[in-house]
Amino acid sequence: ETGVTQTPRHLVMGMTNKKSLKCEQHLGHNAMYWYKQSAKKPLELMFVYSLEERVENNSVPSRFSPECPNSSHLFLHLHTLQPEDSALYLCASSQGQGSYEQYFGPGTRLTVT
Amino acid sequence: AQTVTQSQPEMSVQEAETVTLSCTYDTSESDYYLFWYKQPPSRQMILVIRQEAYKQQNATENRFSVNFQKAAKSFSLKISDSQLGDAAMYFCAFRAPYKLTFGKGTLLTVNP
């Protein structure tokens, strides 16, 4: 499955580091999403972008900063994270704001030490 | 607010047998979509099947079918002739209008 790619696949960072997660979709979609997947918890929607504008921000701490420079790329900038932010971060895209199914990337496994 | 409940954290099935995964949801919306997603150990989430709430007919995709009971707000997934490749985490999801709400998932093990 290469429709939605994410880099890096694994990331270990200290609490004072700054890093970025990248997502790219090759499906011609115009909506992109960031989700957080923690053990034993449902997927949590973090951000939604439609036509490169943020349309949803589910009370995510400011240490997570999304960026959507165009309809094919989505970034999640990370700074001064906490150990509880360790999780699998999934990117997804869809045609329209979820009018149909979302296509997911493989995720970035983030560990905050 | 929408909620999705998957009451079975884990399920197991023998290869070639049939298994049913349960999902219930709560919403005040009348127009919505329901999905089952599969997340194999490789972690990439893929769509298994989709059901539009306005359709009474249950969706079917090859060996996968759903039992959609709108009044009961129930949306179960039946996997027939289970295969080893079906082993994965299965998530039930609800969408209305554009936000996708997931359940906690059911880990399915397929025994040879």
Image (cartoon, grey):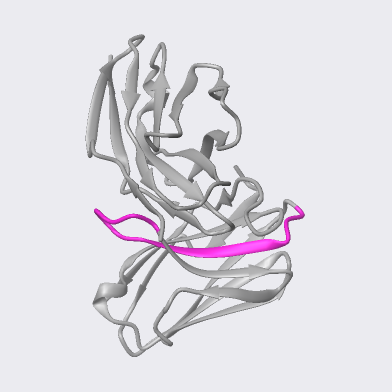
Instruction: Give the image location of residue A29, x and y in percent.
Output: 73, 56
Residue A38 is covered by the magenta coloring: yes
Name the residue furthest right: A28
Residue B43 is situated, as x and y percent measured from the top left of the image, at 42, 46
- Residue B42 seen from this side: no
In which quadrant will I find the N terminus of chain B? bottom left
Q: Which residues are magenta?
A: A28-43
Q: Residue at x 40, y 21 (%)?
A: B78
Residue visible at 72% across and 64% down in the picture: A72
Q: Report if residue A14 lies within the magenta region.
A: no
What quarter of the picture does the C terminus of chain B occupy?
top left
- Evaluate whether residue B80 shows in this view: yes
Image position of B104 with respect to B62: above or below? below
Quadrant of residue B67 within the rendered picture:
top left
- Which residue is rendered at x = 53% and y = 59% of the image? B99
Above or below residue A31? Residue B20 is above
